[in-house]
Amino acid sequence: MDPIENKEITKYLKLPFQFDEERLVADLESIMGSQWIPHFNKEGYEGKWNSIALYASGGEATNIFALNNDEAPIIETHIIKDCLYFKEVICHFKCIMLTVRLLRLEVGAEIKPHSDYNLGYEDNNFRLHIPIITNDDVNFILDGNRLQMLPGECWYTNVNYIHSVSNKGKTDRVHLVIDGKRNAWSDDLFFSLAPKESFFPFKEEIHSAETLEKIIEELKISDQPAVKQLIITLQEELDALNRV
């Protein structure tokens, strides 16, 4: 029996950073009039869930996809040009940026339970949430645990696990969301907060047939070529599981 099997898995972490709430809000207010793009998975939420890309493939501000598969470099979009504090916060993380976005869940909106693909530390990348605006009636549920993230805090979340968000408060909820590539710097940080082995669950626990089916159905909503290729790869993995 693998020793990992008996160890607790780290599915989320509050990182030891506290960013300045007022400066985060000031940068947000400076770009609130920019074009917010509705999330592409229309079936996965109710209400308004929109995004702005700050770092994206080719610097394309309308590209709000996470973990792009094309070969264009991940660079700043024009929207972040004058957001000096956002830039300072992003530079705090000594790793390659995969995507950096603002995600805005408006009052009354709800993101339905779902899991993402290859977005845990075991996949050599990681997702961070830095709340800018939130309220006590935002419910972020990750694998059955409610995470109460406060403005300026920084949280790692393994979104390979089922998660959902609802905003039942009276203000919109806006997070700065960073997807970074794992490296020695992030290893030193993460493994100082939790045992190294706790970040590496069995793949079978996450990529079950049921989970793969849900991910494939969510991805079918997009018509992006890279997403279509990902669907083919996931379908092959699902077919292999079903043959066992």
Image: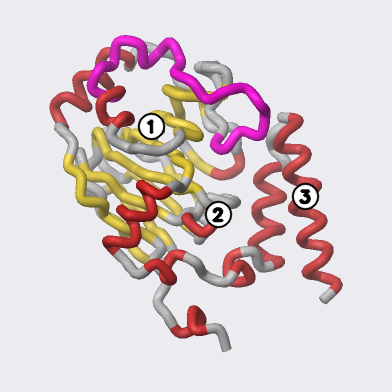
Q: Position of residue 132 (x, y in %)?
A: 25, 34
The foreground one among 124 and 28 is: 124
Q: CA distance from mark 3 to mark 2?
A: 16 Å
Colouring convention used in this rendered image of the protein: secondary structure
Q: Is residue 72 magenta?
A: yes
Residue kind at label 1, given as amino acid type = Arg
Label pair 3/2, CB-CB below 8 angstroms: no
Q: Which residue is mark 2?
A: 123
Which tag is nearer the camera, tag 2 or tag 1? 2
The foreground one among 3 and 117 is: 3
Region rendered in magenta:
66-86
Q: Residues within 10 Å of mark 3 (few under 14, many from 20)?
A: few
Q: Which residue is mark 1?
A: 104
Mark nearer the N terminus (2 vs 1):
1
Residue at 71%, 29% in the rendered image:
224
Q: CA distance from mark 2 to mark 1?
A: 26 Å
Q: Position of residue 209 (x, y in %)?
A: 71, 66
Residue at 44%, 47% in the rendered image:
183
Q: Position of residue 32 (x, y in %)?
A: 32, 16
Q: Please give the label number shown on residue 233.
A: 3
Q: Is residue 242 magenta?
A: no
- Quarter of image, res 41: top right
Residue at 28%, 16% in the rendered image:
83
Secondary structure of residue under mark 1: strand
Q: Position of residue 21 (x, y in %)?
A: 16, 32
Which tag is nearer the camera, tag 3 or tag 2? 2
Label pair 3/1, CB-CB below 8 angstroms: no
Q: Residues within 10 Å of mark 2 (few under 14, many from 20)?
A: some
The foreground one among 171 and 131 is: 131
Q: How many marks?
A: 3
In this rendering, position of residue 18 left or right of residue 182: left
Residue at 41%, 70% in the rendered image:
198
